[in-house]
Image (cartoon, helix red, strand yellow):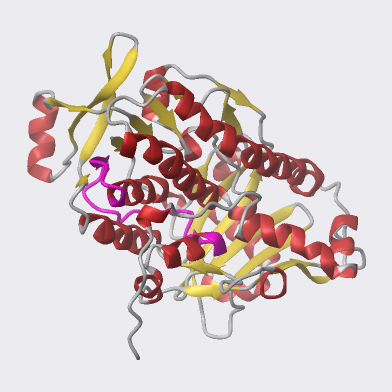
């Protein structure tokens, strides 16, 4: 088994399959996980999965913060969108905010304790290998852009390697090179927004957890990462160049109007527009997530909007379902996996994907797009109708709470991958 992409879905899939005795190689393009990830949430269903895998204590040792509610600040006041503490079942009634590089390293350490697991770092997938009409492996090359090797790489092409595999699983994200190499087409639903991601210092006395702020035509989400805020400022699709041309000071002024309590740190932050990264929002879904010898999951199969922050959770649940369905076959029938088995993964994971993307598209049209156009009523005395309903009928908050923190079809680890933890007194 070859897994392309060492993100959350790829690492979870690799760990589960290796625990089932299936030889699994994960190819990760970079030498480490120390990159600026935008999604640093670990959802309640993933926390339950970690307990099943015997990794709950290891996760608890990571630096993290817990968020048990989702709220949005309007000019008319603060509205609670979801109360996770009261709405969720089980032990984990919250979402954890954790640096994703720490989370991935924890998964890598657990997986590398398994004799059937290999993690190839600095391994960039560049194409697929075929045996007749079947995908039979991955072509990859070393990716090591150090100062010395960069100059050498510029003068000569790097050699390619071949990793033969009975099955290739693409977990390489929304810009999947494997998807492009396979020539798979996606159904595109469009998105009216893009997102600017940047960081701001967090000071003592700032709000805790996640903060959403909507005022006039300005909309921003702020994620509490302890010593800093991870900020997502929503802009209309295609507006990036125009807003950058207005200058950094104009952007800082927008932020100060939107969140006046940030004004004391906006004289120096963001430092430049190099610190403001554009996320080109896409909502897409492959018509087929598989070919003979190839399976795509997570954002490689269905790029998600950042609305709700559910993309990582959905990708991990794809990986768990794939490990159970494909792993069950490979444990008892070594060799290539029939395409009908791969189709079972899509059949199981397509309904929750459709539901969540429908929810995101509804939020785009009904709230986000109207807010950016200035047609959503958000005056100092009026709260938009959907938010008024959530505030008036708290039971309705269970719907977004479950969609965000658990998902419409939570997946559980196969029996062969589960481990009991030895709890020691602290």
Relative image position of residue 128 (x, y in whole percent): 29, 21
The one nearer the camera, 25 or 196, is 25
Q: Which part of the image, by quadrant, shows the C terminus?
A: bottom left
| Left or right: where 80 falls relative to 97 | right
The one nearer the camera, 274 or 350, is 350
**Range shown magenta:** 19-45
Q: On screen, 376 above or below 128? A: below
| Left or right: where 356 falls relative to 4 | right
Q: On screen, 56 above or below 412? A: below
Q: Residue at x 30, y 52 (%)?
A: 19
Residue 54 quadrant:
bottom left
Relative image position of residue 383 (x, y in whole percent): 88, 62
Relative image position of residue 249 (x, y in whole percent): 56, 57
Q: Residue 364: within the magenta? A: no
| Left or right: where 151 falls relative to 410 | left
Q: Residue at x 36, y 23 (%)?
A: 293
The answer, for residue 4, to whether it is visible in the render is: no
The answer, for residue 320, to whether it is visible in the render is: yes
Q: Residue at x 26, y 46 (%)?
A: 21
Q: Which part of the image, by quadrant, shows the N terminus?
A: top left
Question: Which is the main secondary structure of the residues drawn in magenta?
Answer: loop
Outermost residue to the top: 132
| Left or right: where 112 falls relative to 374 | left
Residue 136 quadrant:
top left
Q: Residue 28: within the magenta? A: yes
The one nearer the camera, 200 or 249, is 200
Q: How many labels were placed on the picture?
A: 0
The one nearer the camera, 372 or 127, is 127
Relative image position of residue 292 (x, y in whole percent): 39, 19
């Amino acid at each position: 088994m070859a897994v392309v992409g060492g993100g959350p879905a790829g690492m979870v899939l690799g760990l589960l399959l290796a625990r089932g005795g299936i030889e699994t190689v994960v190819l990760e393009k970079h030498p480490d996980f120390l990159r600026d990830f935008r999604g640093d949430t670990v959802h309640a269903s993933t926390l339950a999965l970690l307990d099943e895998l015997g990794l709950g204590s290891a996760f608890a040792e990571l630096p993290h913060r817990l968020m048990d509610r989702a709220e949005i600040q309007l000019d008319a006041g603060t509205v609670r969108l979801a109360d996770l503490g009261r709405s969720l079942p089980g032990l984990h009634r919250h979402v954890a905010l954790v640096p994703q590089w720490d989370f991935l390293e924890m998964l890598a350490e657990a997986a590398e304790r398994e004799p059937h697991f290999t993690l190839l770092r600095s391994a960039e997938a560049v194409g697929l290998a075929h045996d007749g009409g079947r995908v039979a492996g991955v072509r990859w090359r070393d990716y090591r852009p150090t100062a010395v090797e960069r100059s050498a790489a510029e003068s000569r092409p790097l050699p390619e390697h071949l990793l033969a595999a009975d099955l290739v699983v693409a977990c390489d994200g929304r810009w999947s090179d494997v998807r492009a190499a396979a020539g798979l087409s996606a159904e595109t639903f469009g998105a009216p927004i893009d997102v600017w991601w940047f960081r701001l210092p967090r000071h003592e006395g700032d709000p805790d957890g996640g903060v959403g702020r909507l005022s006039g035509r300005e909309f921003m989400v702020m994620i509490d990462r302890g010593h800093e805020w991870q900020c997502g400022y929503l802009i209309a699709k295609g507006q990036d160049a125009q807003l950058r041309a207005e200058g950094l000071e104009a952007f800082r002024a927008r932020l100060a109007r939107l969140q006046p309590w940030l004004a004391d740190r906006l004289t120096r932050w963001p430092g430049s527009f190099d610190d403001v990264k554009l996320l080109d929002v896409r909502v897409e879904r492959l018509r087929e997530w598989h070919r003979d010898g190839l399976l795509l999951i997570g954002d490689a199969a269905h790029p998600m909007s950042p609305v709700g922050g559910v993309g990582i959770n959905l990708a991990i649940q794809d990986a768990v379902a794939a490990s159970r369905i494909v792993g069950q076959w490979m444990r008892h029938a070594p060799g290539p996996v029939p395409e009908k088995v791969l189709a079972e993964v899509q059949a199981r994971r397509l309904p929750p994907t459709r539901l969540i993307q429908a929810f995101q598209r509804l939020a785009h049209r009904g709230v986000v797009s109207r807010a950016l156009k200035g047609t959503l009523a958000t005056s100092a005395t009026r709260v938009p109708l959907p938010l008024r309903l959530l505030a008036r009928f708290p039971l309705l908050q269970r719907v977004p709470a479950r969609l965000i923190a658990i998902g419409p079809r939570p997946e559980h680890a196969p029996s062969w991958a589960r481990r009991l933890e030895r709890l020691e007194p602290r």
